[in-house]
Amino acid sequence: MGTNVDTAATVRIDRRPVGVAVIRIYNTLTRTTEPLVPRVPGEVGLYVCGMTVYDHCHIGHARAMMAFDVVVRHLRRRGLRVKFVRNHTDVDDKILARALELGVPPLELSAQFIAELDADLDAVGILRPDVAPQVSDHIPEVVAMIEALLTKEHAYLAANGDVYFSIESSPGYGKLSGRKIDELREGARVAVDPNKRHPGDFALWKSVPDSADLGWSAPFGRGRPGWHIECSAMAARHLGEQFDLHGGGIDLVFPHHENEIAQSECASGHRPFATVWMHNGHLTLVDAAGEPVKMSKSLGNVVRIRDLVERVPAEALRLMYVDTHYRSPLPFSDQKLADALAVLDRVYLARETVDEVVGRGVSAPLDQLPDSARDAHALATAFVAKCDAAMDDDFNSAAAIGHFFELVRAINRFGNDKKARARGADALRPALDAFAVVAEVFGIAALTPAAYFDEAKGKRMRAQGRSVEAIDALVAERSAARAAKDWARADAARVQLDEAGITVMDGADGSTWRVRIDA
């Protein structure tokens, strides 16, 4: 996201300890919004299902990662010590198929895409988890959990060497998804197997021959883990048999998370496995008419994170995500991204005004300043409390960002008022806290305005097939023509700049330029 970070913006953030009833979260398990009550006061264990690493991260994958990035940031801001675990599934049928297609060892392929994933998420400022476990490093834990399930007769060894979990042995199976055992059909990721006792039973261990590319020895035969057991084993190792929060996409409620609950609680004998289950809504592509479009390789419309970050500043992508509540569907289009970029420009224009006016330090009492100064001061003073309240209410980033946009609009109105700018340092000083909190929790407005506008114009020019150097040359030509009073040449340069969507700012030290907000 760039290295020119405004560290001064983070010095005045107010933090207060979290009481048990402060943060409220919608729990998929209970279908209610309830207070977060950590098992250990002041500490939160969070497990989020990560990617199956056989390809690059696309914007759908990033929806969950961005949602829980903001969750972790807010919990920490509120004074909680968070242990954040997000796994990499590096043992899976899709990985094996891709490795065979490319002619590389499966674990070598997954290691490559773990590195690619980390690079993509770093580029958009998504925090690294405290622990990023890989399935291949947790085979002993998987085997031990399967042995416990076999011993307690919650699992059985089939004739073909696979080990299955018996859903009929699990009290309350279906409590997360609302599914009933007698209505279940085969899970989407489990092939039909006549060796099953019930069609809803799922594989804990898949038998493989000695010649297989990927497999481990176990008391119940050589094989590799099934999909669901992996997360149960990794969560138990790093967070314990019971912990506070479990997250993932809404598509994981059934069968993955339902099966995690069943096998984990049956293996340990402890309930609940996770106290609160959080699920983010889907990201969907929409066309120009607003109609949903399937994203798939066959259609050639997969939108990768790295491709978008080449086109626009990463913070525009972050803004697009957090401007929608994490549980709501998120429609994505190029227009939506362009809208986020235009808003981000206005955010940095406001930040530029704050830095300039507060930095100059000239102040007058509020009652001697115009309405624009009093409005900006009032909104800036109230912002941090409003933001915290919105985020404490099931991480309502859309409401929090709405409050921020209101403040940004007020600051930009302030910036257009010469009287306010001249003596409004104290009026805008509380806005430093607002920008600091937005940078900390949402990863937005974390750069200096100069760094942001340089990044934005470079990427926009490339997207238009132009170069920054070409625009610099055209601006210099206009300046030289103006100095020579060659108005015809200056006007011609101005027309070219206007057609390119460029705004030129003339000052005592020369002319600078930016890409126009609506360009």
Image (cartoon, rainbow, N blue to C red):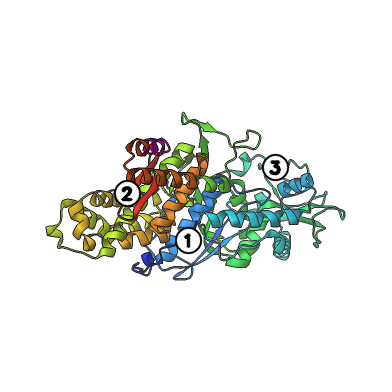
Q: Residues within 10 Å of mark 1 (few under 14, many from 20)?
A: many
Name the residue type under label 1: Val
Give whichever of 438, 451 is nearer the camera.
Answer: 451
Residue pictured at 73% horizontal, 53% vertical: 109
In the orientation shown, which residue stands out farthest toward the left? 368
Please identify the quadrant where the C terminus is shown.
top left
Give how far across and how far down residue 398 sits, in percent. 38, 48
Q: Earlier in the sequence, mark 3 or mark 2?
A: 3
Q: Which residues are magenta?
A: 492-499
Q: How many marks?
A: 3
Residue marked by disc 1: 72
For discs 3 and 2, the disc positioned in front in the rendered view: 2
Give how far across and how far down residue 440 sits, in percent. 42, 61
Q: Which mark is residue 199?
A: 3
Name the residue type under label 3: Pro
Vertical relation: 3 (above or below) 290: below
Q: Quick check: is 257 in the magenta stretch? A: no
Q: Can residue 457 be seen at all in this image of the molecule?
A: yes
Residue pictured at 39% horizontal, 56% vertical: 449
Residue marked by disc 2: 506
Q: Which secondary structure class fits the magenta region best?
A: helix
In the orientation shown, which residue stands out farthest toward the front? 484
Q: Residues within 10 Å of mark 3 (few under 14, many from 20)?
A: many
Give whichever of 475, 252 is nearer the camera.
Answer: 475
Give whichever of 483, 387 is nearer the camera.
Answer: 483
Q: Earlier in the sequence, mark 2 or mark 1?
A: 1
Give whichever of 321, 439 is nearer the camera.
Answer: 439
The span from disc 2 to disc 1 (Cα, nearest Å) is: 44 Å
Q: Can residue 250 be seen at all in this image of the molecule?
A: no
The span from disc 3 to disc 1 (Cα, nearest Å) is: 38 Å
For discs 2 and 1, the disc positioned in front in the rendered view: 2
